[in-house]
Amino acid sequence: MGSQLTGVAMKKKGFYLALIATLLASIVVGVGAYTRLVHAGLGCPDWPGCYGFLTVPDTQQEIAHAESLFPEAPVEVDKGWAEMIHRYVAGSLMLLVLMIVIQAFRHRREPGQPFKLPILILALITLQAAFGMWTVTLKLWPQVVTAHLLGGFATFSLLFLLTLRLSGVHREKVPDKPFLFLKWLAVFSLVLVVGQVSLGGWTSSNYAALACPDLPMCQGQWLPPMNFAEGFDVGQDIGPNYLGGQLHAEARTAIHFAHRVGAILVVILLTLQMFIALRVSFRVGGSIGSTVRKLMLLVMVMLTVQVGLGLSNIIWSLPLSIAVAHNLGGALLLLSLVAYNYFLFGGALKKSGLNNSLQDLQEREG
């Protein structure tokens, strides 16, 4: 007989704000991906406005004035709106995070109320605003574009973590024995997925997504001509307009190839972790074992979806909807691993005020 959960979790102050912020962050990530994929990153050549306006110039008079100010950047209204909507949504998220920090400060003396994490998120999203500005002023310099993408994923992940901490769900300590190896494997998996996300950002910012247009080979070869030195040169010059990319074909192939290898490593590691998690969780049983299996299943579902989206991008030559979904899929895979690590380094997820440890012990002895 499994442990039963009854009652209502006592949510902490700020939970609903954090939940709304997490959902809004997912929209920021999706809109940011859309903006990048439709090549609208320079839809407004200045920051924080657009051609000197608060909104995108759309009348003939406004467009004429805008193009007189920026003669090298003809107005494209659709791309301008994609960029400005991204800024509006990101700005709204920053205001919401500021509200979370204010509320966290007011309740900072309450037991278990996070305060440092909201401060960290506010600092990160402030840095994100700077990256957004540099993305425009440095003309899509790949280093800044990749850092901006990683910052967005980090903001999304930390807001999700904050939501978990404020949810009122009690965590029972997961013992090191027999979970120690699984814990460190979970940490390594999280680090590896962050690395794969970084490769994905570098692939996108250098326009290398279609450098290998076929499967399972690349350009009809298992090892096509590649230039890793150029492809992973993080000292690219500041100044040129990087819209469309500046790298040679062999450098883009190297980036794409590395992203594929990274995906294979992630699949191997997470599959290995799944088998180990199943073996350990069935042996331990109880609420801890059950939660390990459920969260591991969530991770594998997210991984399967993400791999399918990645393959679809190549098969159908990067259709916009699938490419945006691939970006969101990467973020959701990361979040599933955040939840998995949060559980392993805390304990079984139980509603506040409940104590089922005796029942779990009886189940294990039975």
Image (cartoon, rainbow, N blue to C red):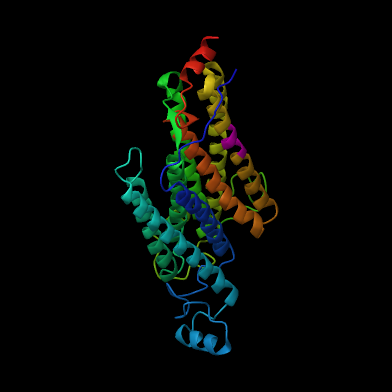
Write the residue at 46% across / 66% down: 140
- Residue that sits furthest to the front in the current view: 7
Give x and y (percent) for residue 159.
44, 48
Give x and y (percent) for residue 170.
44, 32
Where 121 sits versus 188, above or below? below
- Residue that sits furthest to the right in the current view: 316
Write the residue at 37% across / 59% down: 126
Where 135 sits versus 169, above or below? below
The foreground one among 69 and 338 is: 338
Which segment is the magenta one?
297-301
Residue 225 in view, yes or no:
no
Q: Quadrant of the N terminus?
A: top right
The foreground one among 53 and 131 is: 53
Residue 157 in view, yes or no:
yes
Where 185 sits versus 142, above or below? above
Give x and y (percent) for residue 105.
31, 50
In the image, residue 197 lies in the stretch drawn in magenta: no
- Residue that sits furthest to the top in the current view: 366
The foreground one among 204 and 216 is: 204
In the image, residue 299 lies in the stretch drawn in magenta: yes
**Secondary structure that dominates the magenta span:** helix
Give x and y (percent) for residue 253.
56, 53
